[in-house]
Image: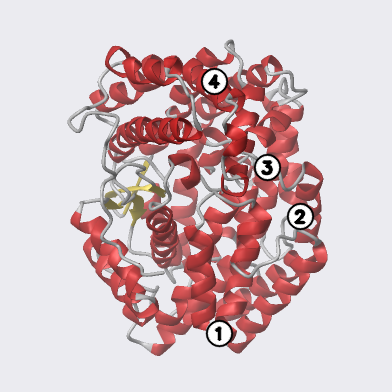
Amino acid sequence: MTLSADIRKMERHFVPKDFVVTDWASLEPFFKDLADRKLDSRADLEKWLKDMSEIEAVVSEDACWRQIKMTCDTTDKTLEEAFTYFCMEIQPKLQPYADQLNRKLVDCPFTKDLDQQKYFTYLRSVKKNIDLFREANIPLQAELNVMQQQYGAIAGKMTVEVNGQEYTLQQAAKFLESHDRKLREEVYRKIQQRRLQDQQAMHDLYTQLVHKRDEVAKNAGFANYRDYKFVELGRFDYTKEDCYQFHEAVKLHVLPLIEKIYQKKKAKLGLDTLRPWDTEAEPEGIEPLKPFTDGKDLYEKSVKCFEELNPFFADCLRKMNELKHFDLESRKGKAPGGYNCPLSESGAPFIFMNAAGQMSDVTTMVHEGGHAIHSFLAHELELSAFKEYPMEIAEVASMAMELFSMNHWEAFFDNPEDLQRAKEHQLERTITIFPWIAIIDKFQHWVYEHPQHSIEERTTEWMKILKEFSTNSIDYTGLDPFREISWQRQLHLFEVPFYYIEYGIAQLGAIGMWMQYQQNPQQALQNYIHALSLGGTKTLPELYKAAGLKFDLSPAHIKTLMEFTATEMDKL
């Protein structure tokens, strides 16, 4: 297939070219047309599907821009109001139509004449949505969409003062790389103390979210929100038992490796005990890695790195830059975190992150860059629904890019020692992220199985799970008040519940892709591009197979991948 990043905004045939989403009154006629239209042949049905896809793309892109603008500036009330208006006034009125159109598609006699292979995952998803739809949940889901955004507003205001200067928590984290241990501890404690100030607001918000989500699940006839969410997320190919198996495999095969990483770190720093403010540090005389200076530099070096890997990847970033689809630097009033937001009508996505000049920012940039490539590759698919791929493959796109790109990080480091340290940092992160994924996932299972829990019970359970996956190499003496609320820094718990195990599943896929890449780079990249260009038109195991991977969460498979990663680390 010929690859081009010269992405074009989809042509409109059903919606007027100059139409802009403002209110429900101007939107409803399009949905009414679709609901009332007669479908007398397969050709009618296919035209109807294309028209529906077109209006979905228009609405989805409008909603995305509202969210992007609001996260770029959480202090601007008008941006927040525009987002809230969509959630409260437009989205709830769309849902009954979406259900009506889903039923119309399933009941249409010509649906059976569609290419069943091509439409299988789409129709499966439509049936799932029909099963889950409840009129009573529309206002609850609208309220949840607005409430979830309060997390960014609370976290976006958090700053600390270091050496007389104000920093966001993301910016302050760079001091944890300093070789001045006293400064590291001081900054670590300041960051944690700042989180403590808002712990009650976070607790209250989370309690409200849990109760409301539980209500949604009960309305839809589920025992709990976890069971509801598994269906809603389209987890057709694995179960909660597979998640438990993953948790156990992390304890068995990942924690021993992490123990070794931290023992080595302790020796390198010449410390008797390793404290949490030491894990990112460098020994005296070794400067922290400085891969770039500012957002512009980060962008330019990423393009250079992607160019070496595959020119098409670099062209995708250039196209996004031309469209001003980047907001990279951390600043006060900006929501925390990082994301790649696909824009279903214009095709070129938007990358948002909080860069502060650290090595982890390079990882975030190439990670979101992997998501962006996925958006470009899936854009050519004919229906919006075909572009809705499972998160477990979406994260392979991003995490594999972190590992693929390592071989070309000369763009960020002209010094071979620094390059080696950066690769070590990346591989350590590839492994050390697993326990946190298991912790966050296991915690959510408990939270939603016990939705009426008290804050004390929540804290007790969190500490129990945290200790279960902790290594003995880090000394946390006297830090329990900080550890008890450490879950509050995880945006996913608030904004995208149950979306986290995907990172673990995908990290396994990414390591598998990287194994391929070490043996045959061209073939691995070909498999990667092929799998991503399928969007969501295949099942998850089929998408993994297209990428040359095995969809497998068993401890034995995880053990193999961990051994490979450990061997690669030893080579460095």
Which of pointers 1 and 4 lies earlier in the amino acid sequence? 4
Q: Secondary structure at mark 3?
A: loop
In this view, the mark in front (4 or 3) = 4
* Most foreground residue, 343 or 82: 343
Q: Are marks 2 and 1 in contact (CB under 8 Å)?
A: no
Q: Secondary structure at mark 4?
A: helix
* Most foreground residue, 485 or 436: 436
Which of pointers 1 and 3 lies earlier in the amino acid sequence? 3
Q: Quadrant of the C terminus?
A: bottom right
Label 3 belongs to which residue? 235
Disc 4 to disc 3, how far (Cα)?
A: 20 Å
Q: Residue 5, percent across and down?
A: 30, 62
Which of pointers 2 and 3 lies earlier in the amino acid sequence? 3
Q: Quadrant of the N terminus?
A: bottom left
Label 2 belongs to which residue? 246
Q: Residue 279, percent across and down?
A: 56, 65
Disc 1 to disc 3, how far (Cα)?
A: 32 Å
Callout 2: few (<14), some (14-19), or many (20+) C-alpha neighbours within 10 Å?
Answer: many
Disc sitting over residue 520 in the figure: 1
Q: Please name the amino acid that badge 1 sits on.
A: Asn
Disc 4 to disc 2, how far (Cα)?
A: 35 Å
- Residue at the spot x=65%, y=30% of the render? 128
In this view, the mark in front (4 or 2) = 4
- Residue at the spot x=68%, y=56% of the render? 541
Q: Residue furthest front?
A: 41
Q: Please name the amino acid that badge 2 sits on.
A: Phe
Disc sitting over residue 99 in the figure: 4
Q: Residue 337, percent across and down?
A: 42, 47
Disc 1 to disc 4, how far (Cα)?
A: 46 Å
- Residue at the spot x=70%, y=43% of the render? 236
